[in-house]
Amino acid sequence: GLEPGDLEELAPRLQRIRADLVTRRTAGELGFADLPQRRDDVRKVVQTAAAVRGEFDTLVVLGIGGSALGARALTLGLAAPGEPFRVVVVDSIDLDAFAGLLAQLDVKRTLFNVISKSGETPETSTATVLVP
């Protein structure tokens, strides 16, 4: 439903948006934009996973909203059938439900990964107090 003239009208606005994105990326405000080039981070994650592989049976990812969506997408997309290692993504502020999950886990064999873009997400931080 767009006509060529409609797109031409958007050109100045799109140029401003592109310039804003470049400025914000240069200032380090859009770290996600550089993720494909951050090979050192990937290497560190792979090394850490290999180092702890035998110590844990379960990974619990604590995150709210977007902090949980990425983990959920990766888990669903990369899960191998019959994989003995279990990944649980907790995207809830319901502490009773989280306490119920903890009761089902061997916490000594569970690795917890807390994800928060700001580092100060209160919902995620609250859940961590329940982990023994």
Image (cartoon, grey):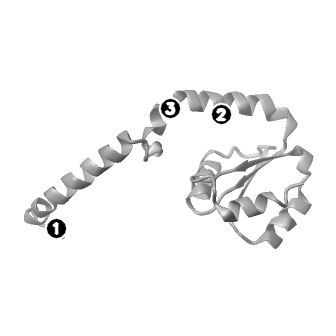
CA separation in Å, label 3 and label 2: 11 Å
51 in relation to 130, above or below: above
Taking depth in this image into account, of 70 and 26 the one nearest to the observer is 26
Circle 2: is it few (<14), some (14-19), or many (20+) Cα within 10 Å?
few
Residue tagged by mark 3?
A: 38
The residue positioned 16% from the left and 67% from the top of the image is 2
Indicate the position of residue 23 as horizontal and vertical percent values.
31, 45
The C terminus lies in which quarter of the figure?
Answer: bottom right
Return the mark for residue 45: 2
The residue positioned 43% from the left and 42% from the top of the image is 28
Indicate the position of residue 69 as horizontal and vertical percent values.
58, 57
Indicate the position of residue 3 as horizontal and vertical percent values.
11, 66
The residue positioned 91% from the left and 62% from the top of the image is 103
Taking depth in this image into account, of 54 and 114 the one nearest to the observer is 114
Q: Is there a contact, CB below 8 Å, between mark 2 and mark 1? A: no
Q: Quadrant of residue 93?
A: bottom right
Q: Secondary structure at mark 1?
A: loop
CA separation in Å, label 2 and label 1: 44 Å
Residue tagged by mark 1?
A: 2
The residue positioned 48% from the left and 38% from the top of the image is 35
